[in-house]
Image: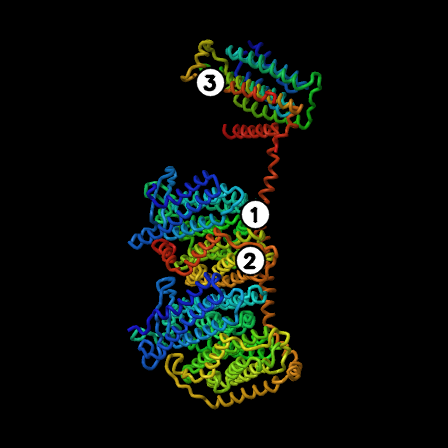
């Protein structure tokens, strides 16, 4: 079991949990968290390199590094792991955000130990979700990722934290309920497993069997899509996002917007579309409309918000809407773009939330009307904010641009009028994005200093610089060398693997 | 006249109903406990009578009653200890006034 | 025998009713005692002498005395008993009558199966009973016996703990 | 034999980018002087390399660059950047052809002048290093734009120039006006870019390529490319006559792409950002908002010119109409402004519109597409003299610390070098021979008259207005009456050499640039063409210009009440022109009143109250329900028992009735 490298994505965090539990001082907690997440990042980088090597050597299996361990044989539940380029990209994203999140919560107070324990438990869920290819295990890790959020927001949050934590958890749990129904439904129509069992939870096996009857797909596909869509902030199930993000502590916002929301998009294509290609083709238009609305709606809403985190949360609604939108286009280019957008949005929004947390930690307000001219006071943070903003509005050379362009070009390939119209509507969001980003940048960073007290504030500390610089480098890396990531991702979206693309 | 099984069951049933009535209406905790004993007792009678009439070769009903009596005794003892303690604290053993522990 | 049964049955019915209707709690306890005695007689009539003895010793001798003591401890003598609210009493009566009706109807509807005479059996001696009580084979009650003893021990400890003056 | 060492073009792009990173990251640790000279030297190197490249292209006669008669397109390198699917790939490359080679001369020249000039102009400013870093970034983006081998590369750098323009306009970030101007510039151009993007999507969907070489030209025997009408027609026919809303989709694509150009080149109605962009430092205005970035729209149309020629010229007509209206509008507004930079800004808009019209009226069958050549020629000369004018204006502002020409007057005595160079600029733009503007403008007018008399007459009128407002400006600054300069610390005087040297250089170029045989260098299909001055157009237009100048002299040379009387006489028209015909107000109304108040706010309200309210409503209902059933858990034992017994009874009844 331990010869499979993927298992270490769960093992390392568990060891980290233990290490943090045994830590005596803040310094020890930090070093365990940072060392662990560096290890995870290194592991994912190594895996990507190794993966590309294997692919180059001609390994055409849909998933590599497979491992199967029977867990509960009566229901044929297995712990099966395996990754493709997309999972690897997501693993890399998660570990980078965990690393930067650890840096961003360098001085977390109170209860630092508990904070890190929950944070790492959350990341276990995330990593486990991305390496699993067994529906049940996947779902289990999904839940593991959701629950710590409640405590993390409820205890370490700000503002109406109990309300927000409750709202977030309940809405996501509601999504999980749909999801579970759908998973059970899929299970009972999955067709036989290779090991002789009557049903299976194994994603690849279900896809290979393709045995789910069409009338059931009509029922299960929306369930699964909505279930994951709630986490992907799909209109109209997005309202947990503004409140949740606004109240969450920095690192949690980063992880939540950066990684957890990606679970939604990932699940949508890995479970809903991959397993139910027929319904995906038939019903895509409904969700296309919803996600198309998400994209513009989120952007328009962001234009009039005054709380930094709300702006960013609505911007996330818009950007994540674009992810689901592109997935629903059901062609290779758009879906590749969707995954790139997931990567890009993950990094960029983590950067945003990190910066907002740092600014809030200094000024103690997130209201843009009460701040101004921060460029003069804290140039480093302000410059980072501008870069994040530029990434968000799609400046070439940063990640947002390549992702959005891939999506738009891909979406435009669909000749259907509805798709075309919504593609153009989605394109409009880039202008609106520019409006709200520049509005914030103009009010917050530029202009005269609003509050005399802010003049005493200091610029970023070394750990804050490390955190933001890492993210910026990653954003720029995707923006400057997009083909590397596109090639990593594109393999999975071939018609041989994805039945829906035929 | 021979005494049939049914004849034993009737007083037992009435005893049980009295227990129900007492349990629902009395306010004094001890009175409630007494009603409880009545109900238990009526059940014991049923066990024994069924045992004796329908399965005369075994003694399960008898043993069941035996243990029921033992447990009833234990339960009563403990309940009375609590009641007395409660009385010490509140000078009152009315079941409806005793709601200090309720959230 | 028949006369004895009639007397016992009447005693059970009357004293049960009195137990729950008596205004004063001490009287309730006394009527309970009589009911328990009548029950003991039923056990004797079933040829379970040991059970009858236990009934008298534990219930009549132990529990009722415990009741009496606690009543004396928790209420002043001569205090007028509680008054029942009519609504509550009505509810109680209704429930009790409902119970009686339903189960009575069940009994009556099973009349034919229940109208069986008492079969003759051999003597069940104390030796047999003791052996059964401590036997682990079929028809033995070793485990419940031990469980009850543990329960009683727990009860004793619990009683001590609860009643201890803090 | 490789026609050119690919390292040189690579360096042209890489050097400014490196400089940007170096100055951006290490700048705060450098002294102002070090950072400034580093920037100047960097740009100087780029200048030399670009000149080398351009001269190699034009004059080496290498068979990769010319087939003996026609000039060819040559791709120096072309690296895959992002692959969408098998055919559709974004590449980053370097395309050498007549117009990109010409731009390789224009951009580094102006950029170098501005770099040098800023050493004096920006001396001691806070954020000096940042300024130089942004200048480098801009130069990189602009160079990347002009050498783009495919339309998507152009879009990428198009966005980058927009961003660097945003950063430079907002350089004085503590001033509200600068911040809002930069915001406006970015958003307006972004809106235009939306059209550009959709245009690219449409075009690339049907043609299946982004590459210019596959859209407009055909490969030649030695691997270069030649403009080919057949290829362009192939691209046109790949649309298969698809239509949308009654217009052919091909026209839609081109018009949408042109919309991007309208935004960048400040054509009506997307021109509103350019006058505000003057909030940036003056050298930036000279570089970005006069000479280089704003002509990107013209460049874009020129780049896709073979496509524009198809489809019954409807896209080209659109270009012409937009250009003509803009030219006239901007010229009228320029006559009334008092801020010297704004006058120059409107003059820029008007001149760019000239170039657009020139492209719009160009037809391959009339003098080998002379309009195209004229447009590019004017782009070149305009870059020189407009940069000169802006830099001159910068020197003036530097001297009197005001943008407003009511604070100036009679400056010819104090600032002789500036005066002479500015006058040269004015003469050039007014179209007085032998200055460069005369030649290029004359070509444009000729092309317009060739197309139709209406456009020719219209453009002649605009040319007259140009001469008038430029000389109005000139007289107001250097003549008129002299305000009291004693309030200043010192009398106005000429700037230090780092500032005057670029002025002199540009003035010299403006004097001689007209004699460049442009027709031999830049034509739409690379075929050489000898320019003949059409005297029937040239003489009247010179006369018109001289008359306009005379009128300006009469009105503005000495202080007199005439201008006020004219303003009063024209009344509302003057006020409207002064307020730029209220375009800003209209936009403000649309953005604030309609988009913000009628779309954004209702949506935000809807989200908070309806959507969120529904979600909270579910929670509320659940809570109410639990409160409603909470009394069941009363804690009353007797009640529990009653419920229990009732339940047991019910079960008993059910069992008794149904089971037995």
Q: Secondary structure at mark 1?
A: loop
Badge 1 is on which residue?
Answer: A158
Q: Nearer the viewer, mark 2 or mark 3?
A: 2
How far from the left and from the top, in percent, is residue D639?
Answer: 61, 29
**Residue ID at (69%, 22%):** C82
Task: Confirm whether circles 3 and 1 share one chain.
Answer: no
Chain identifier of the residue bearing label 3 in the image: C
Q: Is any part of residue D246 visible from this angle?
A: no
Q: Nearer the viewer, residue D624 or B87?
A: B87
Badge 3 is on which residue?
Answer: C146
Specify the quadrant of the image occupied by residue A408.
bottom left
Q: Nearer the viewer, residue D57 or D205?
A: D57
Badge 2 is on which residue?
Answer: A377
Q: Is any part of residue D624 visible from this angle?
A: yes
Q: Secondary structure at mark 2?
A: helix
Whether C44 is drawn above or below A4: the answer is: above
Question: Are the residues tagged 1 and 2 within 8 Å (C-beta)?
Answer: no
Q: Say whether disc 1 or disc 2 marks the residue closer to the N-terminus.
A: 1
């Amino acid at each position: 079991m331990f010869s499979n490298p993927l298992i270490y994505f769960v093992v390392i965090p568990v060891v980290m949990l233990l290490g943090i539990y045994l830590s005596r001082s803040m310094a020890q907690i930090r070093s365990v968290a940072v060392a662990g997440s560096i290890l995870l990042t290194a592991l994912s980088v190594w895996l990507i390199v190794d993966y590309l090597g294997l692919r180059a050597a001609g390994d055409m299996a849909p998933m590599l590094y497979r491992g199967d361990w029977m867990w509960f044989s009566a229901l044929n539940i297995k712990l099966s792991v395996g990754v493709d380029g997309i999972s690897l990209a997501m693993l890399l994203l998660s570990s980078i955000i965990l690393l930067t999140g650890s840096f961003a919560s360098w001085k977390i107070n109170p209860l630092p130990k508990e904070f890190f324990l929950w944070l790492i438990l959350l990341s276990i869920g995330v990593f486990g979700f991305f390496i699993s290819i067994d529906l049940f295990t996947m779902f289990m890790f999904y839940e593991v990722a959701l629950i710590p959020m409640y405590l993390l927001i409820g205890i370490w949050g700000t503002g109406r934290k109990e309300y927000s934590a409750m709202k977030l958890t309940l809405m996501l749990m509601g999504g999980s309920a749909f999801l579970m129904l759908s998973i059970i439904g899929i299970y009972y129509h999955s067709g036989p497993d290779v090991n002789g069992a009557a049903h299976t939870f194994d994603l690849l096996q279900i896809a290979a069997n393709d045995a789910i009857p069409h009338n059931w797909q009509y029922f299960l596909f929306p369930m699964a899509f909505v279930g994951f869509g709630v986490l992907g902030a799909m209109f109209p199930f997005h309202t947990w996002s503004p409140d949740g993000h606004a109240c969450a502590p920095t690192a949690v916002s980063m992880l939540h917007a950066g990684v957890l929301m990606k679970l939604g998009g990932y699940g949508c294509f890995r479970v809903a579309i991959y397993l139910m290609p027929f319904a995906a083709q038939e019903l895509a238009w409904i969700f296309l409309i919803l996600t198309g609305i998400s994209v513009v709606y989120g952007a328009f809403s962001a234009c009039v918000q005054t709380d930094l985190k709300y702006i960013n949360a609505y911007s996330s609604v818009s950007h994540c809407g674009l992810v689901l939108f592109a997935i629903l286009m059901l062609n290779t280019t758009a879906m590749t773009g969707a995954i790139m957008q997931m990567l890009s949005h993950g990094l960029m929004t983590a950067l945003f939330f990190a910066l907002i947390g740092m600014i809030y930690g200094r000024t103690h307000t997130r209201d843009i009307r009460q701040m101004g001219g921060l460029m003069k006071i804290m140039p480093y943070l302000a410059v980072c904010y501008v870069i994040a903003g530029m990434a968000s509005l799609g400046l070439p050379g940063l990640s947002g641009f390549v992702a959005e362009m891939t999506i738009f070009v891909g979406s435009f390939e669909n000749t259907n009028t509805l798709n075309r119209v919504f593609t153009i509507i989605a394109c409009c969001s880039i202008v609106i994005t520019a409006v709200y980003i520049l509005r914030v940048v103009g009010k917050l960073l530029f202009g005269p200093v609003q509050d005399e007290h802010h003049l005493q504030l200091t610029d970023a500390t070394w750990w804050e610089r490390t955190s933001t610089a890492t993210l910026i480098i990653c954003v720029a890396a995707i923006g400057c060398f997009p083909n590397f990531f596109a090639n990593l991702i594109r393999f999975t979206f071939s018609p041989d693997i994805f039945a829906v693309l035929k | 006249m021979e005494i049939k099984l049914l004849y034993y069951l009737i007083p037992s049933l009435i005893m049980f109903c009295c227990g129900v009535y007492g349990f629902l209406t009395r306010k004094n905790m001890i009175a409630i406990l007494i009603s409880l004993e009545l109900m238990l007792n009526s059940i014991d009678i049923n066990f024994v009578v069924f045992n004796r009439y329908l399965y005369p070769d075994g003694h399960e009903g008898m043993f069941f009653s035996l243990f029921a009596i033992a447990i009833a005794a234990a339960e009563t003892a403990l309940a009375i200890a609590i009641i007395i303690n409660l009385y010490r604290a509140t000078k009152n053993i009315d079941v409806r006034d005793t709601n200090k522990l309720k959230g | 025998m028949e006369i004895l049964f009639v007397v016992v049955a009447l005693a059970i019915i009357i004293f049960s009713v009195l137990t729950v209707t008596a205004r004063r709690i001490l009287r309730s306890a006394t009527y309970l005692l009589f009911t328990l005695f009548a029950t003991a007689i039923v056990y004797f009539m079933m040829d379970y002498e040991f059970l009858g003895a236990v009934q008298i010793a534990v219930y009549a001798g132990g529990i009722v005395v415990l009741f009496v003591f606690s009543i004396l401890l928790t209420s002043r003598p001569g205090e007028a008993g509680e008054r029942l609210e009519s609504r509550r009493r009505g509810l109680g009566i209704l429930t009790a009558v409902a119970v009686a009706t339903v189960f009575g109807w069940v009994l009556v509807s099973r009349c034919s199966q229940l109208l069986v005479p008492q079969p003759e059996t051999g003597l069940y001696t104390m030796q047999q009973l003791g052996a059964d009580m401590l036997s682990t084979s079929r028809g033995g009650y070793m485990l419940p016996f031990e469980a009850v003893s543990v329960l009683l021990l727990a009860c004793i400890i619990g009683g001590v703990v609860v009643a201890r003056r803090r | 034999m490789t026609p050119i060492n690919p390292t040189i073009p690579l360096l042209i792009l890489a050097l400014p980018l490196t400089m940007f990173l170096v100055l951006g990251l290490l700048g705060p640790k450098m002294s102002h002087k070090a950072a400034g000279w580093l920037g100047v030297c960097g740009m100087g190197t780029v200048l030399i390399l670009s000149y080398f490249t351009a001269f190699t292209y034009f004059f080496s006669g290498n068979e990769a660059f010319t087939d003996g008669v026609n000039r060819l397109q040559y791709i120096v390198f072309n690296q895959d950047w992002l692959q969408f699917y098998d055919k559709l790939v974004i590449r980053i490359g370097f395309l050498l052809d007549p117009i990109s080679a010409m731009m390789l001369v224009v951009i580094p020249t102006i950029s170098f002048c501005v770099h040098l000039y800023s050493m004096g102009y920006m001396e001691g400013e806070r954020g000096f290093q940042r300024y130089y870093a942004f200048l480098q970034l801009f130069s990189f983006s602009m160079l990347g734009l002009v050498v783009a081998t495919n339309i998507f590369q152009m879009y990428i750098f198009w966005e980058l120039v927009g961003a660097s323009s945003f950063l430079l306009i907002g350089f004085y970030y503590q001033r509200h006006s600068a911040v809002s101007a930069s915001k406006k510039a970015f958003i307006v151009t972004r809106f235009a870019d939306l059209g550009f993007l959709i245009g690219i999507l449409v075009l690339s969907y049907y043609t299946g390529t982004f590459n210019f070489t596959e859209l407009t030209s055909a490969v030649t025997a030695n691997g270069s490319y030649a403009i080919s009408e057949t290829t362009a027609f192939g691209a046109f026919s790949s649309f298969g006559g698809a239509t949308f809303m009654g217009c052919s989709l091909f026209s839609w694509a081109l018009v949408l792409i042109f919309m991007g150009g309208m935004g960048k080149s400040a054509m009506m109605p997307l021109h509103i950002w350019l006058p505000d962009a003057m909030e940036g430092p003056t050298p930036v205005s000279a570089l970005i908002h006069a000479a280089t970035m704003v002509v990107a729209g013209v460049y874009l149309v020129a780049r896709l010119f073979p496509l524009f020629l198809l489809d019954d010229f409807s896209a080209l007509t659109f270009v012409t109409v937009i250009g003509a209206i803009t030219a006239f509008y901007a010229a009228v507004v320029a006559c009334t402004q008092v801020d010297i930079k704004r006058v120059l800004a409107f003059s820029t808009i008007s001149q760019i519109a000239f170039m657009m019209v020139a492209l719009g009226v160009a037809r391959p069958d009339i003098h080998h597409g002379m309009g195209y050549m004229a447009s590019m020629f004017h782009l070149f000369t305009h870059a020189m003299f407009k940069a000169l004018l802006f830099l001159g204006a910068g020197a003036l502002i530097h001297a009197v610390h005001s943008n407003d020409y009511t604070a100036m007057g009679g400056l010819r005595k104090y600032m002789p070098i500036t005066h002479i160079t500015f006058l040269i600029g004015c003469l050039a733009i007014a179209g007085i021979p032998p200055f460069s503007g005369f030649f290029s403008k004359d070509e444009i007018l000729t092309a317009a008259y060739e197309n139709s008399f209406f456009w020719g007459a219209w453009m002649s009128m605009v040319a007259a207005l140009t001469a008038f407002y430029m000389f109005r400006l000139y007289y107001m600054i250097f003549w008129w009456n002299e305000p009291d300069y004693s309030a200043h610390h010192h009398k106005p005087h000429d700037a230090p050499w780092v500032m005057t040297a670029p002025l002199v250089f540009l003035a010299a170029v403006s004097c001689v640039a007209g004699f460049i045989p442009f027709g031999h260098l830049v034509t739409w299909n690379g075929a050489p063409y000898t320019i003949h001055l059409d005297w029937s157009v040239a003489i009247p237009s010179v006369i018109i210009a001289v008359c306009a100048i005379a009128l300006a002299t009469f009105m503005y040379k000495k202080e007199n009440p005439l201008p006020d009387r004219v303003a009063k006489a024209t009344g509302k028209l003057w006020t409207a022109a002064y307020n730029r015909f209220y375009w800003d107000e209209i936009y403000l109304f649309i953005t604030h009143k309609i988009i913000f108040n009628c779309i954004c706010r209702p949506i935000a309200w809807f989200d908070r109250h309806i959507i969120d309210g529904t979600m909270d409503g579910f929670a509320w209902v659940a809570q109410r329900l639990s409160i409603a059933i909470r009394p069941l858990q009363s804690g009353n034992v007797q009640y529990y028992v009653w419920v229990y017994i009732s339940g047991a009874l019910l079960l008993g009844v059910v069992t008794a009735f149904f089971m037995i």
